[in-house]
Amino acid sequence: MAEALLSGQGLGYSAGEAPLLRDVSAELRGGSVLGIIGPNGAGKSTLVRLLIGQLLPAAGQVTLKGRPLAAWPRRERARLIGHLPQHFEPHWDYRVEELLRLGLDRAGPGAPGLRELADRFELGALLRRTWSTLSGGERARALAASVLAPDPPVVLADEPAAALDVGQAAALMARLRDLARKGAAVAVVVHDLNLAARWCDRLLLLEGGRAAMEARPDEVLGAPELDRVFATRFRRVALPGGGMLLAPGD
């Protein structure tokens, strides 16, 4: 099994007296995609923010390549960890080409050129457009292109497909999957359980700030625990060749 490039052990975090995360552990291993799922308020975004160092845990520890995350210089941490946030609003009204160049500036030898990167994310016609003029889906693609341009060894994405149409969401998940095939450690918060089933290697199910279950997608999505946590009865349809499709039941 590949080593854990980014690991959070026994993480806890509170806002005032309200605990948002309690004793949650997560390991991001090279070559693997971890899907983080759960209902609203389960602690998914809080976990991501702890793992990237945006929040400091009240309990537990985060390590990057076996070294405490807090011990890494910020610049080095930013080079090693690519973060796709749930919400992003730049201070300056960047043009798309400027945002992509910011990502390419962090890349090493062998990085794509600006035009190639733009084409990968269907941004070729938008390079001169400013952030404020973009739709939600266009912003999501531009941000993803900038963050993923240097092929960071660790990637955390918080609902990256939320503003994308079906085809674009699948394409982005495929890119994250491809990064993992190249050796990256990837974690992604996913609301669409069918996307999670298709593209993730393991799923971490959160409930009320705690880890309810972690296992292979077929084990988590087929478990009664999923219905209980989401307070719904799912219909499960077996797919040819393996896997399943989930839909809310009656």
Image: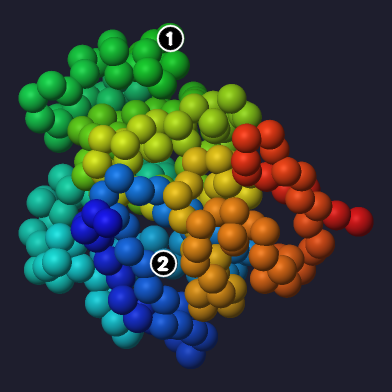
User: What residue sits 51% from the left and 57% below the top?
Assistant: 216
Q: Are marks 2 and 1 in contact (CB under 8 Å)?
A: no
Query: In the rendered image, which residue does mark 1 sit on?
Result: 125
Residue 157 vs 60, above or below: the answer is above
User: What residue sits 63% from the left and 49% below the top?
Assistant: 193
In the picture provided, is 219 more to the left or to the right than 98?
right
> Is 18 in front, or is 66?
66
Quadrant where the N terminus is found in the figure: bottom left
- Residue 112 drawn at (x, y percent): 21, 18
Q: Could you say whether the residue bearing mark 1 is in a helix, strand or loop?
A: helix
- Residue 195 drawn at (x, y percent): 58, 42
Circle 2 packing at 10 Å, graded few (<14), some (14-19), many (20+), is many
The type of residue carrying mark 1 is Ala
Circle 1 packing at 10 Å, graded few (<14), some (14-19), many (20+), is few
Task: Give the alpha-carbon distance from disc 2 to disc 1, as whole Å.
Answer: 36 Å
Find residue 114 and report its image quarter.
Answer: top left
> Is 158 in front, or is 233?
233
